[in-house]
Image (spheres, grey):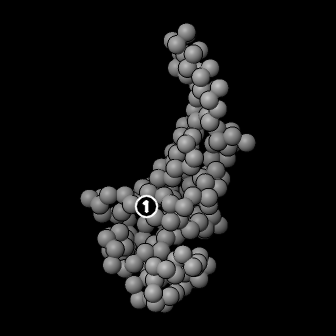
Amino acid sequence: MSNISNAKSDPIGQIWDKLEKVHAVMLGSPDHSQHMQPMAPQTAREENAVWFYTKTTTDIARAADGGGGHVHLCIFGDNDWYACLDGHLETMRSPEHVDRYWSSITEAWYPGGKTDPELIMMKFTPASGEIWASTSSTIKFGWEIAKANLTDKEPDVGYKTAVNFRAA
């Protein structure tokens, strides 16, 4: 099924599917003066959460400590699908999640292993968001552009929808 079809039929499911496949997302900070930064998502669909490893000394962890705050998370899937979510980001000591997502890649960042004193998890809980899905077909894209130029109607090459995780 295409990105557009999935965005129409199951947008929240599509977001989780994309999150499980990407290596990085752009994650905002509760301190809105900080720039978004790339982070490796660890998805927990059943918890309605996305987890991230970070160090207690990072600016984003410091900003999310003590209750956290409102942030945005952006996902880029292929060249024809994008999403921006908003939700709550907080730091948590969660040995369960450290174990669940641990890998040799993660281990390279934490010399003290799973009990490294600087290791902390951040939990992002999405609230709402928007998806932009477009056609990946160059033929359809070309046809729609030609048709639009002949008819003065906007080309039909994509779909945008809003999602609400709280209602799901």
Apparent side of residue 146 relative to residue 91 in the rendered image (left or right): right
Amino acid type indicated by mark 1: Pro
Q: Secondary structure at mark 1?
A: strand
Q: Mark 1 — residue?
A: 38
Q: Position of residue 110 (x, y in %)?
A: 46, 83
**Residue 43 occupies quadrant:** bottom right
| Residue 67, quarter of picture | bottom left
| Residue closer to the observer: 53 or 70 | 53
Give the residue at x 54% y 61%.
23
Name the residue: 52% across, 50% down: 76
Up the image or down, 81 lies above or below 110; here it is: above
Residue in the picture at 50% in, 60% down: 24
Where does the image place residue 84, in percent across and percent down from the top left? Answer: 48, 49
In the displayed orientation, state which residue is furthest to the left: 33
Q: Residue at x 39, y 84 (%)?
A: 118
Is residue 152 shown above or below 32?
A: above
- Measured as percent of width and height from the top left, residue 49 is found at 55, 66
Q: Please indicate, yes or no, whether residue 36 appears anywhere in the rendered image.
A: yes
